[in-house]
Image (spheres, helix red, strand yellow):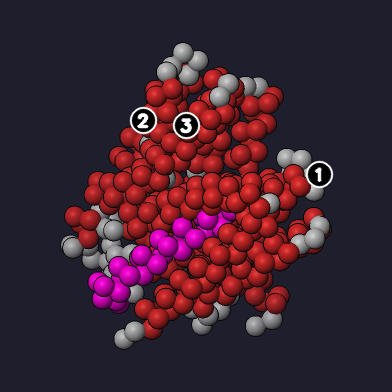
Amino acid sequence: MSSGASARSAIAAYRVLPARAGWGYLIATSLGRLPLSMMPLAILTLATASTGSIALAGVAAAAAALGEAVGAPTSGALTDRFGQRPVLLAGVVLNVVFAVTFVTTIAEAPDALIIALAGATGLSLPQVGPLSRVRWMAMSRDDLSAAFAFEGVTDEVVYIVGPALVGILAVTVSPEVALLSAAGLIAVFVTQFALHPSARFTIRRDDAATDASPDTALPLSTTARRAIGALVLGGMLAMGTFFGASQAGLTSFALANGLGDSGSLLYAVMAVGSAATTVAMVALPDRIGFPTRWVIAGAGMALGAVGMLLAPNVWILLVWAIIAGAFQGPALLTIFSVAGSIAQPGRAGILMTLTGSGVVMGVAVGTSLGGALAAEGGSAAAFGLVVAAAAVLAALGIGVGALTRRP
């Protein structure tokens, strides 16, 4: 197939999505997940400004991240049991209440209450991204490649725009408004997402046995399915570690080279490259299976990480960061696709949210460990962790290939 034909095929694949779900759905799922990238930073910013303690603010932000890591699979299991709509609407109410309480009490609240409210805010964050993938799996398996690519690009954009929006609002208005804006987005767009008619397509666990639609999961034994699920979670932990350690390494590199606080801009370059290649993934032929894509993506990320580790200046670093970023989006898309391929009816919610929470936990590990390594050995030490995370990711892909090739 010519490159022009491939491009036209890719565009046609994405054109199906608004026809399948509607523009309202695409807007709701995009803006509804934006607070996930805003809340931790907004909590950190507000806690720092209100208490004057960066240490307390860091613990509060960590509590929010830990709360989300626990709350995501919990909410996923609840959606499998009771359906997405009631769980999402309950999450909207709880999250907005916790966020507003955090804003209105932080000036006078004791440290323990600040940390508890931050954790509760993270715990109640509605998991729009993973649950949107569950809906696409229920709405149309035929368009799943384009739908998951759209989801992956949306995640990449969200994690660029969200923190930037928090910074802009905190500086131009106030840190309180930054956090309340995230809560407002949840109130409006997560509610819209919850009430969208597509919620009725998802299958609850109790209804799975009597549902007439076919089970489209790969025909695997229970042991193989669980093993692949463990490798998927491990892959997401490695992805998150890659993200967090990359942020730490790029921040350290920027400081060491007189670029000030521009580490986040260097990381944004990686994300932009990632989004571009993720969009193009729908043009990849089906004969290149998920395990092969997984291994190639991990190897490409490792190659880019080695280049960043050895880069003598910022311009060469940017080239290698773009190369690493070009593979990280396809890796994330592939891992979610593998998770989708083993999800059985009535169990997709917990699988997708658990997969998503793996990234959150990995980012926490990568940021903290990468920061500690950078403090001791500079950016090269942090980039060493990035290389290791990518290598582990590639190795896990080999394991997935071995399990899916078994008769």
Of circles 1 and 2, which is in front? 1
**Magenta residues, start to end:** 219-247
The kind of residue on which mark 1 rests is Gly
* Residue 241 drawn at (x, y percent): 52, 55
Q: Earlier in the sequence, mark 1 or mark 3?
A: 3
Instruction: Relative to 266, say whether 168 is above or below.
Output: above
Instruction: Relative to 353, say whether 230 is above or below.
Output: below
The kind of residue on which mark 3 rests is Ala
Q: Which residue is the site of mark 2? A: 94
Q: Earlier in the sequence, mark 2 or mark 3?
A: 3
Q: Earlier in the sequence, mark 1 or mark 2?
A: 2
Q: Which label was assigned to residue 60?
A: 3
Marks 3 and 2: in contact by CB < 8 Å? no
Compute the Cα span from label 2 to label 3.
18 Å
Of circles 1 and 3, which is in front? 1
Assess whether residue 7 is covered by the magenta stretch.
no
Quadrant assignment for the N terminus:
bottom right
- Image quadrant where residue 229 sits: bottom left
Callout 1 crowding tier (Cα within 10 Å): few <14, some 14–19, many ≥20: few
Q: Which label was assigned to residue 189?
A: none
Q: Which residue is the site of mark 1? A: 258
Q: Residue at x 34, y 74 (%)?
A: 218
Q: Considering the numbered disc 1 on the image, is that residue within a helix, a strand or a loop? A: loop
Looking at the image, can residue 69 be seen?
yes
Compute the Cα span from label 1 to label 2.
44 Å
Quadrant assignment for the C terminus:
bottom left
Instruction: Relative to 360, say whether 318 is above or below.
Output: below
The kind of residue on which mark 2 rests is Leu
- Image quadrant where residue 125 sits: top left
In the rendered view, does 347 fall on the left or right side of 63? left
